[in-house]
Amino acid sequence: MEVAAIIDSLNDAQREAVSAPSRSMLVLAGAGSGKTRVLVHRIAWLIKIEHISPLNILAVTFTNKAAKEMRGRVEDLLNISARSMWIGTFHGLAHRLLRQHNKEAKLPDTFQVIDSDDQLRLIKRLMKAMNVDDNRWPPKQVVWYINAQKDEGIRAKHIQESSDVYQQQLLLIYRGYEDLCARSGLVDFAELLLKAHETLRDNAELLEFYRARFKYVHVDEFQDTNTVQYAWLRLLTEGQDNLFVVGDDDQSIYGWRGAKIENMFNFQKHYPNHKLIRLEQNYRSTGNILKASNALIACNDGRMGKELRTDDGDGDLISLYSAFNEQDEAYFVVERIRKWVAEGNLRSDVAILYRSNAQSRQFEEKLMATGTPYRVYGGLRFFDRMEIKNALAYLFLMMHKDNDSAFERIINTPTRGVGTKTLDDIRRLAREKQISLWLAMLELMKAGHFTPRAENALKGFVLLINNLSKQSGELELYEQVKNVIEKSGLIEFHKKEKGDKGEARVENLEELVNAARQFDYDEDNEENFSELDLFLAHAALESGDAQADDFEDCVQLMTLHSAKGLEFPIVFMVGLEEGLFPSRQSVDDIGRLEEERRLCYVGMTRAMKMLYISYAESRRLYGKENYPRPSRFLKEIPSELLQEIRLRANVSKPVATNKQTKMTIGTSGRYQLGQRVRHVKFGEGVVLQVEGEGAQERVQINFANAGMKWLMLSYAKLEIL
DNA sequence: AGACAGCAACTTTTT
DNA sequence: GTTGCTGTCT
């Protein structure tokens, strides 16, 4: 393979980044500028042109999806297997590191990764045991506090005792939680990263080894790294000057979960020899969409500076629709989609992007009503589902009988007559003697502590778990899973559930068997861990991407956050209202407001051909009617790039921006005097008067058959003729 | 054990 | 307005 194959398809800036003599590099990659491409080609360049062994290359991403894609693309480009190359998520790589060096990490070799759900349960249990008032210290906030500390690299021992009762209690819980995890060999997500960092930091030999091994370190979405992640990267690359990062400060939208946009600036300080390359050529969107996006993001301060451009034409103007309420907004969007599809286009070309999940419902209802297939992203992932976690808990428990969280989860699921009293007794003994729940249960049984009823129930349970684990040796992984879901009675249990909920759960359980069958044993295995153990870790680390669902052509619904990295020919960005987007919690803080603006920028730059933006004059939120102002972001888009859409005749005219007075429905011309309309009950009529504003707006209509009526626009369903 | 009522909560999400 | 959790009742 020659140079040309790797470089020919790139533009100048991309080429410069890909072929740079090895050293640190900051690629400031705008939306749609081909950043993954640069990363992939860079790796190919190193291997093929500079003859670097894949073993010396490390590439880190945030999501499993991105990691998988990168690996796949490197393999395609080079036509080799990239197995020996470390490509993975921060968490995945940290996990691998800890498994391989669990001794240095001071972890038992059976340590288990717990997900956020397990973490919350654990905290709840701990707090109960500690007698903490969960009104004053809501468990969710406690978890948030602990994770935030860990993300910053702060252990409980680093935190000063506080005279503030609230703070002090948090600290005590943090301590207790650390102890508990250490005792039971549990590692949460934040812990993976922190522990991986500490292990390298405190083991000179290990650190030397990995520094020598990873001569080339690459990071995707660098703007999303948190403190510990960046510290880990620095540790690995210190004195090596070999950190190649790709990111976009304008797309940093995860500050709220610890991402430090500052890392981009710090990088420039910490790696003074780095080269900075800007990728500003955009291959995704039309000129107008880019102009609008550039103008919007220019309102942020302290950017690294970047302006997207395209060689393609301006394309259509951005369409703005002012709906009178959220119903109308949904109606508008769905009508446009129908039109698009009727013209012979794909539904999957269309995305509806919203700020908060709660907004999806309106659109779902309208889509459902029109029989338009759609898919909502987000929500529960496969491995997060209750029934799946229950099944996994059985697998956990049969492997590791002293895993208390697995025990708690399934001791009475499916219900087998183990009540609160029984469980409390077990818990008490376990705490007193510092032993696992499983052992405590056995001891109490031996002592004849329980009533015959409870005794029987527990006997059945012990027998079940013992049998399952006895059989496990002879069975394939998927057979074990199958065995578990059948013998445990989980299938039976969910079959009895009413509604299609139970049915879906049974299906999911069956799907779990498939997941086990497809599980690639070798992929993660360098040490001699059992296949089942690795499968369980896999389940915790990989949430099971949106399951390769039906390939049905459907409209895509998702939050702006989950749209990052994706692109669609048509994008509807909805709910551009003050208080919703930007969200109310963000408007008082300039930093958070700027993050909202970046989110808006991310949303706009998802659109390839057409971008529709809408807002509602009136929106029902938490059961109350609201009359929000249009989002400030609308005013930041140059008005000449916008056209206002009218449902009726598609009249377009520039929108007046920078004005406090917005157009009210009454005067916006949607219902003009003389307008012919149709009402579901009253039939056809003519509008004679309009009065009021927003949701109070009323129209007087003379119906041919029903006579004169006053109707509230927000309630009446009027069709414009 | 399961059903139901009363209660607060409620941005964004990957691992 | 909807959801999810808790506590109480049958």
Image (cartoon, coloured by chain):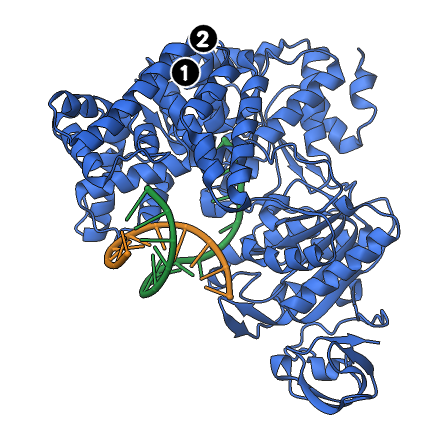
Chain colours: A blue, B green, C orange
Query: If the image is split into quadrants, where does the C terminus of chain A sit?
Result: bottom right
- Amino acid at circle 2: Glu
**Picture residue at 39% right of the left edge, 30% below the top:** A114
- Residue plotted at (21% across, 32% down): A453
* SS assignment at label 2: loop
Instruction: Tell me residue A574's x, y (percent).
Output: 66, 60
Q: Is residue A344 above or below residue A453?
A: below
Residue A382, relative to residue A711: is it above or below? above
Taking the image as shown, residue A416 lies to the left or right of residue A196, namely: left
Instruction: Report x, y in % for residue A498.
Output: 49, 45
Q: Is disc 1 surrounded by few (<14), some (14 to 19) or many (20+) residues within 10 Å?
A: many
Q: Which of A417 and A720 is in front in this view?
A: A417
CB under 8 Å between discs 1 and 2 = yes
Q: Which chain carries label 1?
A: A
The residue that disc 1 covers is A99
Q: Mark 1 or 2 closer to N-term?
A: 1
Q: Position of residue B12 (x, y in %)?
A: 53, 49
Classed neighbour count for the residue bearing mark 2: other residues with Cα under 10 Å, few (<14), some (14–19), many (≥20): few
Q: Is residue A339 left or right of residue A571?
A: right
Locate residue A271, reporting x and y percent.
53, 29
Is residue A460 shown to the viewer in this render? Answer: yes
Q: Which mark is residue A242?
A: none
Question: Which amino acid is tagged 1?
Answer: Arg
Residue at mark 2: A527
**Secondary structure beneath label 1:** helix
C-alpha separation, residue under disc 1 versus residue under disc 2: 8 Å
